[in-house]
Image (spheres, helix red, strand yellow):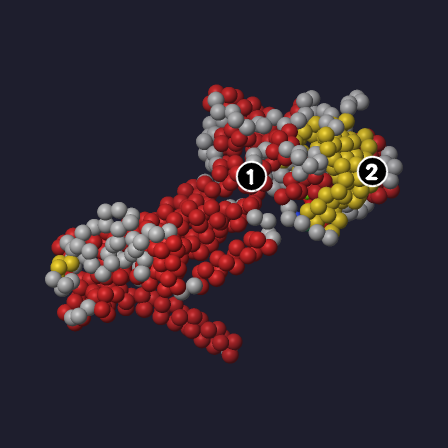
Amino acid sequence: MNNKTKVKVENLNCFYDDFQALKDINMEIKSKEITALIGPSGCGKSTFLRCLNRMNDLIEGARIEGIVCIDDYDIYQNGTDVVSLRKKVGMVFQQPNPFPKSIYDNIAYGPRIHGIKDRSRLNEIVEKSLKNSALWEEVKDRLDTSALDLSGGQQQRLCIARALAVEPDILLMDEPASALDPVATSRIEDLMKDLAENYTIVIVTHNMQQAARISDRTGFFLMGELIEFDRTETIFEKPAQQKTEDYITGRFG
Amino acid sequence: MSRKYKQFFGFMALRLAGLIVLFVLFYIIYDIVSKGLSSINWEFISQPPRRGMTEGGIYPAIVGTFYVTVITALVSVPLGMFGAIYLNEYAKKGRLSRLIRMAIRNLAGVPSIVFGLFGVALFVQWFNFGPSLISAGFTLGLMTLPVTITASEEALKTVPDAYRKGSLALGATRWETIKTNVLPLAIPGMMTGSILGLARAAGETAPILFTGAAFFIPHLPDSPFSQFMALPYHLYILATQHHNISVVRPIAYATALVLIVLVLLINLTAIILRIKYRKKFENK
Ligand SMILES: Nc1ncnc2c1ncn2[C@@H]1O[C@H](COP(=O)(O)OP(=O)(O)OP(=O)(O)O)[C@@H](O)[C@H]1O
Ligand SMILES: [Mg+2]
């Protein structure tokens, strides 16, 4: 497939005070594809994700240079409505962060913020989002219990459901399967493939097989640089860079 | 062996410090109860003073202290909450917020008699409220502001940042995030801290001395602009200004007892609130 470009990143640099966490990143993320980001810990994957929905704005001392265009709109230009940007670009955090509310209220949080009050509409959204994140069967009888009582893996799926409930265009997922067992993981992977029919997905993963299984394109980060970005088959079968090959084959940490 | 002894004596010193605190508290309570309890009866808490305060009760002072504490709360709790929300949620860590914090710290150190003089200048004279409940309440409100702001900020700090970020990432505005995802968790803590500050204010004499407390008024204040009697001031008069101090000494102790019970009741509210909300958190 040769979809159109959804996100275009040009010469992106990101600094935390004096430390440069991203160095001159160029990347085109295609619409309705799954893009996987891989690389060793601390190489800047989460930082890169946060550049795409301007969550770095919230970090004191973070500074960004370069251009990030979503649907041909530069999201760092003056006057950008950050609130609607974040509605459009959903995010699942590396650490599951359920709110200390009921399961139902967690999922309904976003829709309510965006003005949906009708109870039956909310019920529908909650059910659909939980089904999509493969959590519905486990929690359908206790939607009004606290989300903090869920297991770590369930919390991760809850956070996915919560992000889906606002129907974003783009979904950024930071290691969404890190606390999941193989069954739940494969359900999340199936889910992502389904979601990719309608959404553009960017996923950070430390699991090479996962990246290979589900993604259309893969980017390999190393110390703040995007070493290689290509179709997933190419990256995994005949990478252009020696460093990429070393990383994928596990020859380096 | 010597390390063990060091440890032993260290512990003993620490424990002693703790016990001294306990002893002082109980001694004060014991002293007041033993000397004041016999003068307390229904008349004492339901009647105004009579015969130059040698007979009758302290009803107007109880009511006055209650009213002035309510006004204090109305001033200092909202201001403290809003100030804390601004400082913790909105203000960038820059010059201005450093300046405000410094002001709060210094305000906390200003002696209460100075607040009293300031209240005279600002509320009694400048705003022309006269010596009144409202002047005294506002003065006490400003005096407790550092406590309510600090308590509120501490409460906001206990709300994990992940709740804010999670909400913002869903496209909520900052204010929506604070309103729906931060305040509900912080308000119990804000309340407990603020109430403890109010309990302190209820027992203050100096700030109300010139701003509205009256030596003797046989009736209750009928508007916020009336002068009023207050327990701490009444106690101060009975203990030091009365023409027949030895005769009114039991009444002074009884007044102290009522004041202490009142303050403990206020503190108890704070404690109950805290326990109730802690339970609620633990269930979740
Ligand atoms: N808030 C911050 N302030 C300062 N430095 C930061 C901050 N967040 C990240 N960094 C630094 O930026 C670099 C990239 O961090 P980032 O979290 O993006 O890595 P990552 O690739 O997501 O790692 P991991 O796989 O462990 O999650 C690291 O060196 C990190 O120490
Ligand atoms: Mg990360």
Query: Quick check: B35 above or below A178?
Result: below
Q: Amino acid at mark 2?
A: Glu
Where residue A1 sits: x, y (%)?
79, 21
Question: Can residue B117 be seen in this snapshot?
Answer: yes
Q: Chain of mark 2?
A: A
Q: Is residue A195 left or right of residue B96?
A: right
Quarter location, residue A130 = top right
Q: In the structure shown, which secondary structural element does the residue marked by tag 2 occupy?
A: strand
Where residue A13 sits: x, y (%)?
76, 43
Where residue B75 sits: x, y (%)?
38, 49
Identify residue for label 2. A228
Residue B6, disc: none
Where residue A239 sits: x, y (%)?
85, 36
Residue sitting at x 20%, y 56%: B217
Q: Is residue A217 left or right of residue A143?
A: right
Identify residue for label 1. B174
Query: Count of labels shown?
Result: 2
Between A44 and B59, which is closer to the camera in this rendering?
Answer: B59
Between B143 and A207, which is closer to the camera in this rendering?
Answer: B143
Residue sitting at x 15%, y 58%: B49
Q: Chain of mark 1?
A: B
Query: Quick check: A79 above or below B80?
Result: above
Q: Quadrant of ligand 2?
A: top right
Question: Can residue A213 be seen in this snapshot?
Answer: no
Query: Quick check: A125 above or below B71?
Result: above
Q: In the structure shown, which secondary structural element does the residue marked by tag 1 occupy?
A: helix
Residue sitting at x 81%, y 35%: A229
Q: Amino acid at mark 1?
A: Arg
Query: Quick check: A128 above or below B116?
Result: above
Quarter location, residue B213 = bottom left
- Cα separation between marks 1 and 2: 37 Å
Camera-side mark, 1 or 2: 1
